[in-house]
Image: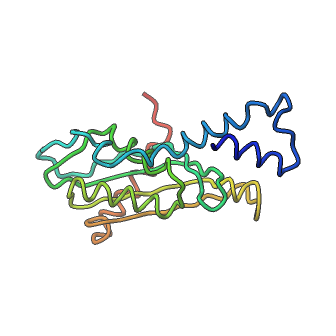
Amino acid sequence: MIAKLVAQLLKELGEDAQREGLAKTPERVEAALKFLTSGYDKKVEDVLNDALFVENYDEMVIVKDIDFASLCEHHLLLFIGKCHVAYMPRKKIVGLSKIPRLVDMFAKRLQVQERLTTQIANALNEALEPRGVAVVMEAIHTCMLVRGVEKQNSKAVTSAMLGAFRDRPETRAEFMELIKSGRGLQL
């Protein structure tokens, strides 16, 4: 069905959807859109699937520089960037690989960056019941690069701070400093 709509869209744009270069484009666009919106098929519980553990650890846990790509719900154009996530455990920790999977789950939906940021923070807060959660996202929005204001070097930065990250400026400052340090870390 999506492929047929894309073929019609190409026709409305003045193109011949049957010409050699476009003949398979409707199917490719359908596959791309299904991939870029595959987060609708997942739930937080499925992503975290039994990766919550009781551990006597109460210091900050950070997973930073998580690459993500999402579709802007206003223009259906990509926004691409990095996500930095931290939490301060109370009694539960989560397998570290689950945090990027959680980011991907929410990013692979039609989004605005502000909602995406809070969805990640709220999901971790509900699942872990930690002392605090922090999420900072930095993204380049192609809708700003290629249309409208056409600002090539603009980056949007959003944050969600819950618990200790909201209530304690020194905790928030430590997180912000830690996500700035160590860029380009080589192993």
Please report the residue visible at 54 percent of the width from the left and 61 percent of the height from the top.
112
Q: Position of residue 152 (x, y in %)?
A: 73, 55
Total count of labels: 0
Instruction: State which quadrant residue 182 falls in.
Output: top left
Please report the residue visible at 50 percent of the width from the left and 42 percent of the height from the top.
67
Q: Quadrant of the C terminus?
A: top left
Please report the residue visible at 22 percent of the width from the left and 53 percent of the height from the top.
128
Q: Is residue 63 visible to the viewer in this orientation of the structure?
A: yes
Q: Nearer the viewer, residue 71 or 113?
A: 71
Q: Position of residue 129 (x, y in %)?
A: 20, 58
Q: Position of residue 148 (x, y in %)?
A: 76, 64
Q: Is residue 65 visible to the viewer in this orientation of the structure?
A: no
Q: How is the image coloured?
A: rainbow
Instruction: State which quadrant residue 149 falls in.
Output: bottom right
Q: Residue furthest bottom?
A: 167
Q: In the image, 60: left or right of 73?
A: left
Q: Quadrant of the N terminus?
A: top right
Q: Position of residue 24 (x, y in %)?
A: 73, 30
Q: Nearer the viewer, residue 27 or 134?
A: 27
